[in-house]
Image (cartoon, helix red, strand yellow):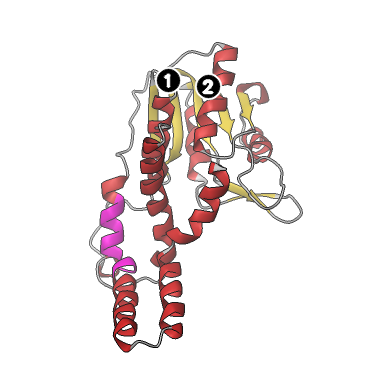
Amino acid sequence: MFFILSKLFAFLLIPFNWMLILGIIFILIKNKKIRKKIGIGIVIIGIIFSNPFIYRTANFWWQPNPTILPNNFKSDVVILLGGFSGFDKFDNGYMGDNADRFIQAANLYHSNQVKYILISSGSGHLLFNEPSEASYVIKELVRNGIKKEAIIIEDKSRNTYENAVYSKQILNTLHLQEPYILVTSAQHMRRSNAIFNKLGYKNIIPYPCDYKVYPTKFNFEDTIIPDIRLLHNWKYLIKEIIGLFVYRITGKA
């Protein structure tokens, strides 16, 4: 039920959809005073959530700093959370916008800082069946020069909480020792790290990547000029903030 509700609630996390809903109400309501207030609300949402400076500031506040590991650091396992690839209608896999997760996990392996890569991801779709993401990622890891015997698959999880639960079961069974390195997107790391710690991982090292914003030289476009794409991009940050709050009040983080 929690999984289903989270998928249905996702629609309400997009500022553009707030504007759309208010726009429909604006058309249906005849009261001029209410229509005026709704119109002002639509404009305010558009101005705030299309502003690059506000978006960048919010992400800088939320994203953790990069983790720099010592050159001689060693770990048994890097836990790679899925959510960076998908399938077409023919079940062919493709890398997506968050593919830096894959790159950083592979880099840790190739630098001899980890022995194993645990890819944790089943299928997160609600309405139709598709292969587990892990079944695609393992093929790509092997193509990237990683030995198949160094790859551990967890392909039942549908969300971050289940990532942590099922990964822990596998790691305990294989008697692999902490510290574990946790690789996921910077926006997603706060919630992920909180969940893993709550479930009893004693020594988990956050390794954020896939930064949505990062320090750059001054650019006029990044401060004032509205960017309509941000009306959708805010969804991911809002999802993480609300998700962490919900997990905490339900005792999962």
Can residue 216 be seen here? The reply is no
Label 1: which secondary element: loop
Residue 174 tag number: none
Given contact means CB atoms under 8 Å apart, are the residues at marks 1 and 2 in contact? yes
Q: Residue at x 40, y 31 (%)?
A: 251
In the rendered image, residue 252, in percent from the top left (x then y), is placed at: 43, 32
- Magenta-highlighted residues: 48-59
> Relative to 242, is 23 above or below?
below
Q: Residue at x 42, y 43 (%)?
A: 188
Is 156 placed left or right of 99 in the picture?
right
Magenta segment main secondary structure: helix
* Amino acid type shown at disc 2: Lys
Residue that numbered label 1 is attached to = 200
* Amino acid type shown at disc 1: Gly
Where, quadrant-wise, is the N terminus in this rendering? top right
Q: Residue at x 41, y 73 (%)?
A: 19
Q: Residue at x 32, y 70 (%)?
A: 45
